[in-house]
Image (spheres, rainbow, N blue to C red):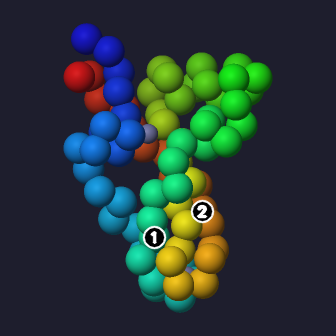
Amino acid sequence: MEQQCPLCNGLIEVSENCPSCDGVMMDSGRITAYLGPYSAYLEQQSNIEKCVHLLACQECGLDIRVSVDTVPL
Ligand SMILES: [Zn+2]
Ligand SMILES: [Zn+2]
């Protein structure tokens, strides 16, 4: 079995509200996807236990990072 991110795999939905305006946050994807393959530290870290996602508010545009616990799939 492999540790996988349930959010990346569509098993869960983003359930965060914007800390600024309480709007709906939308998943903008993994942070590692933005940083590319050169970010060895982040990549390694997310592969082992956490997947870091960028969430963007649909109302005010604020973005936050959330760490998603990976699960064995
Ligand atoms: Zn993920
Ligand atoms: Zn907002």
Residues at badges 2 and 1 in contact (C-beta under 8 Å)? yes
Q: Looking at mark 2, is its residue's CB closer than 8 Å to ligand 2?
A: no
Vertical position of residue 32 compared to residue 47: above or below:
below
Residue 11 visible (yes or no)? yes
Query: For mark 2, what is the residue?
Result: 64
Query: For mark 1, what is the residue?
Result: 25
- Amino acid type at mark 2: Ile
Q: Is residue 56 left or right of residue 68?
A: right
Q: Position of residue 18 (x, y in %)?
A: 50, 77
Q: Earlier in the sequence, mark 2 or mark 1?
A: 1
Q: Position of residue 31 (x, y in %)?
A: 61, 43
For the C terminus, give its image quadrant. Answer: top left
Q: Position of residue 69 (x, y in %)?
A: 39, 38
> Few, some or many C-alpha atoms within 10 Å of disc 2 (few <14, some 14-19, many ≥20)?
some
Residue 41 visible (yes or no)? no
- Amino acid type at mark 1: Met
Q: Looking at mark 1, is its residue's CB closer than 8 Å to ligand 2?
A: yes
* Label 2 secondary element: strand
Q: Is residue 57 left or right of residue 24?
A: right
Q: CA distance from mark 2 to mark 1?
A: 9 Å
Q: Which residue occupies 38% across, 40% down?
A: 8
